[in-house]
Image: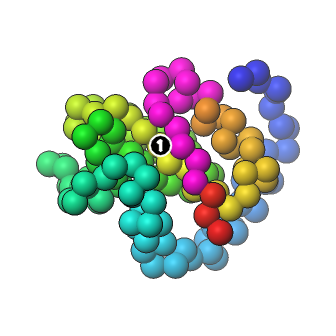
Protein backbone atom coordinates (compact mmCIF):
# COMPACT_ATOMS: atom_id res chain seq x y z
CA UNK A 1 0.00 0.00 0.00
CA UNK A 2 2.73 2.42 -0.95
CA UNK A 3 2.12 6.12 -1.51
CA UNK A 4 3.41 7.28 -4.86
CA UNK A 5 3.22 11.02 -4.24
CA UNK A 6 0.63 13.59 -5.12
CA UNK A 7 -0.62 14.86 -8.40
CA UNK A 8 -0.05 18.60 -8.66
CA UNK A 9 -2.87 19.01 -11.19
CA UNK A 10 -5.52 17.46 -8.97
CA UNK A 11 -7.92 20.38 -8.77
CA UNK A 12 -8.58 20.50 -12.51
CA UNK A 13 -9.47 16.82 -12.45
CA UNK A 14 -11.75 17.29 -9.45
CA UNK A 15 -13.59 20.09 -11.19
CA UNK A 16 -14.18 17.93 -14.25
CA UNK A 17 -15.35 15.07 -12.03
CA UNK A 18 -17.71 17.38 -10.17
CA UNK A 19 -19.19 18.66 -13.42
CA UNK A 20 -19.60 15.13 -14.75
CA UNK A 21 -21.35 14.03 -11.54
CA UNK A 22 -23.72 16.99 -11.65
CA UNK A 23 -25.10 15.81 -14.98
CA UNK A 24 -25.20 12.10 -14.21
CA UNK A 25 -28.34 10.76 -12.59
CA UNK A 26 -28.32 7.13 -11.55
CA UNK A 27 -31.35 5.08 -12.48
CA UNK A 28 -33.88 5.02 -9.62
CA UNK A 29 -33.17 2.35 -7.04
CA UNK A 30 -30.04 1.25 -8.95
CA UNK A 31 -28.16 0.07 -5.88
CA UNK A 32 -31.14 -1.43 -4.07
CA UNK A 33 -31.92 -3.57 -7.12
CA UNK A 34 -28.34 -4.82 -7.15
CA UNK A 35 -28.48 -5.47 -3.40
CA UNK A 36 -31.59 -7.59 -3.89
CA UNK A 37 -29.88 -9.48 -6.71
CA UNK A 38 -26.69 -10.28 -4.77
CA UNK A 39 -28.04 -10.67 -1.22
CA UNK A 40 -28.28 -14.48 -1.47
CA UNK A 41 -24.46 -14.63 -1.70
CA UNK A 42 -24.18 -12.99 1.72
CA UNK A 43 -26.77 -15.01 3.67
CA UNK A 44 -29.08 -12.04 4.16
CA UNK A 45 -32.29 -13.06 5.94
CA UNK A 46 -35.71 -11.60 5.27
CA UNK A 47 -35.76 -8.04 6.59
CA UNK A 48 -31.98 -7.78 6.26
CA UNK A 49 -32.02 -5.61 3.13
CA UNK A 50 -32.13 -1.86 3.80
CA UNK A 51 -32.39 -2.63 7.51
CA UNK A 52 -33.43 0.55 9.33
CA UNK A 53 -31.55 1.44 12.51
CA UNK A 54 -32.72 3.44 15.53
CA UNK A 55 -31.27 6.67 14.08
CA UNK A 56 -33.07 6.29 10.72
CA UNK A 57 -29.92 5.19 8.89
CA UNK A 58 -30.12 2.02 6.82
CA UNK A 59 -27.71 -0.86 6.56
CA UNK A 60 -27.70 -2.10 2.96
CA UNK A 61 -27.42 -5.75 3.99
CA UNK A 62 -27.50 -7.09 7.55
CA UNK A 63 -26.63 -10.73 8.21
CA UNK A 64 -26.12 -12.55 11.48
CA UNK A 65 -22.39 -11.89 11.22
CA UNK A 66 -21.90 -8.77 9.04
CA UNK A 67 -23.24 -5.28 8.48
CA UNK A 68 -22.60 -4.77 4.74
CA UNK A 69 -22.35 -1.44 2.99
CA UNK A 70 -22.87 -1.74 -0.77
CA UNK A 71 -21.52 1.11 -2.86
CA UNK A 72 -20.00 1.99 -6.18
CA UNK A 73 -16.25 1.53 -6.27
CA UNK A 74 -15.56 5.25 -6.61
CA UNK A 75 -17.42 5.87 -3.34
CA UNK A 76 -15.20 3.51 -1.38
CA UNK A 77 -14.23 6.19 1.15
CA UNK A 78 -17.79 6.74 2.35
CA UNK A 79 -18.38 2.98 2.32
CA UNK A 80 -15.54 2.57 4.84
CA UNK A 81 -17.09 5.04 7.29
CA UNK A 82 -20.58 3.67 6.88
CA UNK A 83 -19.50 0.04 7.34
CA UNK A 84 -17.61 0.89 10.52
CA UNK A 85 -20.57 2.86 11.91
CA UNK A 86 -23.10 0.14 11.06
CA UNK A 87 -20.78 -2.43 12.61
CA UNK A 88 -20.62 -0.43 15.81
CA UNK A 89 -24.37 0.13 16.05
CA UNK A 90 -25.39 -3.44 15.14
CA UNK A 91 -22.58 -5.27 16.95
CA UNK A 92 -21.71 -7.08 13.72
CA UNK A 93 -18.47 -7.26 11.75
CA UNK A 94 -18.00 -4.53 9.12
CA UNK A 95 -18.24 -5.45 5.47
CA UNK A 96 -18.13 -3.61 2.16
CA UNK A 97 -19.35 -4.75 -1.23
CA UNK A 98 -17.93 -2.56 -3.97
CA UNK A 99 -19.74 -2.47 -7.30
CA UNK A 100 -17.73 -2.14 -10.49
CA UNK A 101 -18.23 -2.78 -14.16
CA UNK A 102 -14.50 -2.94 -14.90
CA UNK A 103 -11.99 -4.13 -12.30
CA UNK A 104 -9.00 -3.05 -14.40
CA UNK A 105 -10.29 0.48 -14.84
CA UNK A 106 -11.16 0.71 -11.15
CA UNK A 107 -8.00 -1.02 -9.88
CA UNK A 108 -6.66 2.05 -8.07
CA UNK A 109 -9.91 2.56 -6.12
CA UNK A 110 -10.07 -1.14 -5.28
CA UNK A 111 -6.43 -1.13 -4.12
CA UNK A 112 -6.96 1.86 -1.84
CA UNK A 113 -10.03 0.30 -0.31
CA UNK A 114 -8.19 -3.01 0.18
CA UNK A 115 -5.43 -1.19 2.09
CA UNK A 116 -7.86 0.53 4.44
CA UNK A 117 -9.98 -2.59 4.92
CA UNK A 118 -6.91 -4.67 5.77
CA UNK A 119 -5.83 -2.08 8.34
CA UNK A 120 -9.24 -1.86 10.06
CA UNK A 121 -10.49 -5.43 9.76
CA UNK A 122 -13.25 -4.74 7.24
CA UNK A 123 -14.23 -7.62 4.98
CA UNK A 124 -14.18 -6.48 1.36
CA UNK A 125 -16.00 -8.08 -1.56
CA UNK A 126 -16.03 -6.93 -5.18
CA UNK A 127 -19.10 -7.46 -7.37
CA UNK A 128 -18.73 -7.01 -11.11
CA UNK A 129 -21.97 -5.55 -12.41
CA UNK A 130 -22.66 -5.44 -16.12
Q: Does residue 94 appear left or right of residue 76 in this picture?
A: left
Image coordinates for residue 26, horizontal then vertical, percent: 54, 74
Q: Does residue 29 appear left or right of residue 106 in this picture?
A: left
Quarter residue 1 falls in: top right
- Please name whichever residue, 22 or 43, is drawn nearer the observer in this view of the structure: 43
User: The magenta stretch spans which residues?
Assistant: 115-127
Image coordinates for residue 55, horizontal then vertical, percent: 18, 49
Q: Residue extending furthest left? A: 54
Image quadrant in which the C terminus is located: bottom right
Image coordinates for residue 98, horizontal then vertical, percent: 55, 50
| Residue 16 makes an appearance in the image | yes
- Please name whichever residue, 83 or 49, is drawn nearer the observer in this view of the structure: 49
Q: Does residue 43 appear left or right of residue 9 in this picture?
A: left
Q: How is the image coloured?
A: rainbow
Tell me if residue 122 is in the magenta stretch.
yes
- Mark 1, Cα crowd under 10 Å, few <14 / some 14-19 / many 20+, is many
On screen, residue 119 above or below 90: above
Q: Residue at x 29, y 45 (%)?
A: 63
Image coordinates for residue 56, horizontal then vertical, percent: 20, 55
Q: Residue at x 52, y 38 (%)?
A: 124
Q: Does residue 6 appear left or right of residue 50 in this picture?
A: right
Q: Residue at x 62, y 74 (%)?
A: 24
Secondary structure category for the residue under label 1: strand
On screen, residue 130 above or below 27: above
Tell me if residue 108 is in the magenta stretch.
no
Q: Residue at x 83, y 37 (%)?
A: 7
| Residue 18 makes an appearance in the image | no
Quarter residue 129 falls in: bottom right
Which residue is denoted by mark 1 in the rendering?
96
- Please name whichever residue, 54 or 129, is drawn nearer the observer in this view of the structure: 129
Amino acid sequence: CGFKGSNTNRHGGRLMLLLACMFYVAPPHYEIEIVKRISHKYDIPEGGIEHRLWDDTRVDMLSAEFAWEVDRVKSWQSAVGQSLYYSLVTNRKPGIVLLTSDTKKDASHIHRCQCVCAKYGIRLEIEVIK
